[in-house]
Image (cartoon, coloured by chain):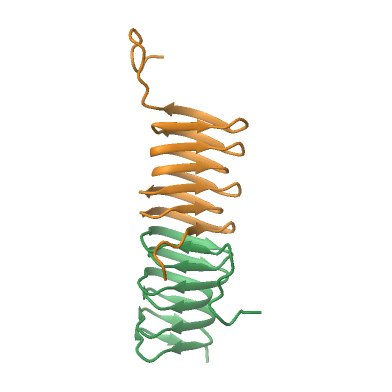
Chain colours: A green, B orange
Amino acid sequence: MAKEKDTKPMANTVIGSTLVIDGEITGEESLTILGTVKGKIAVAQNLVVEAGATVEADVEAQTVTVSGRLTGNVVARERLELKPESKMVGDAKSPRIVIADGAGFKGNVDMDV
Amino acid sequence: MASDEPCLIASKSAVRGQISGKQDLVVEGRVEGRIGLESHLTIEESGSVEADMDVSQVTVRGEARGDMVAARSAVLHATARVAGKIRAPEIVIEDGAKFSGTIEMEVELPAGIKAGGA
């Protein structure tokens, strides 16, 4: 099953590029953000912060993939990936962390070793 | 990614706080707080919204509670259960829909009837 990739099955929560959410998002599905979210995010599956998206939130998810900007502390239970051009400021905690060439990151890394 | 991708709050997801934007939004899950959109809000059958809503158009098939202001129209389908206040120039309540609260349309009252009176 396509679990490694940015899975995009139907019925995932999608926050579009013009949307601004100030508050808290929780869910059992994956969450894709193209817009702006401030506050707190806790999802049971994958969080994708697309290019152009801005997230200022503490984040907890199974996997976190960042192509946009993320400010806040991240706990990814399985994997955190910072794509090229992404910017992240905050502390990262995950057993697997990938920082691509071109990604910007400032903060602590905790891989639980 | 296309900016006109449909926005969805999926059925097992919840947003607490304020949502604003210019894009159509479909709620299959839960929203608490405030929704301000220059576009179309759809609350699906599994959706539940407890919020003050200020949108261009609203379509309800699920549950909603709060003040609803629609610049164009508000449609409550047969499965809708809504409590609160609805203000819109065009309001449709289908047979089977449940609503309790106040409705405000811009109605031209016949001469001799005072506006705002009971």
Say if A81 sits above or below B105 in the image.
below
Quarter of the picture containing the N terminus of chain B is bottom left
Q: Quadrant of residue B99?
A: top right
Say if B101 sits above or below B48 in the image.
above
Name the one closer to the observer, A10 or A82: A10
Task: Tally the marks.
Answer: 0
Image location (x, y in percent) of residue A7: 56, 75
A15 relative position to B112: left or right = right
B48 relative position to B103: left or right = right
Image location (x, y in percent) of residue A93: 47, 82
Name the one closer to the observer, B51 or A53: A53
Quarter of the picture containing the C terminus of chain B is top left
Judge whether residue A94 can be spotted in this image. yes
* Residue at image location 53% in from the left, 52% down from the top: B30
* Residue at image location 60% in from the left, 46% down from the top: B45
Task: Kindly give the residue lying farthest to the right in the view shown.
Answer: A1
Q: Quadrant of residue A35?
A: bottom left
Name the one closer to the observer, B17 or B105: B105
Image location (x, y in percent) of residue A83: 41, 84
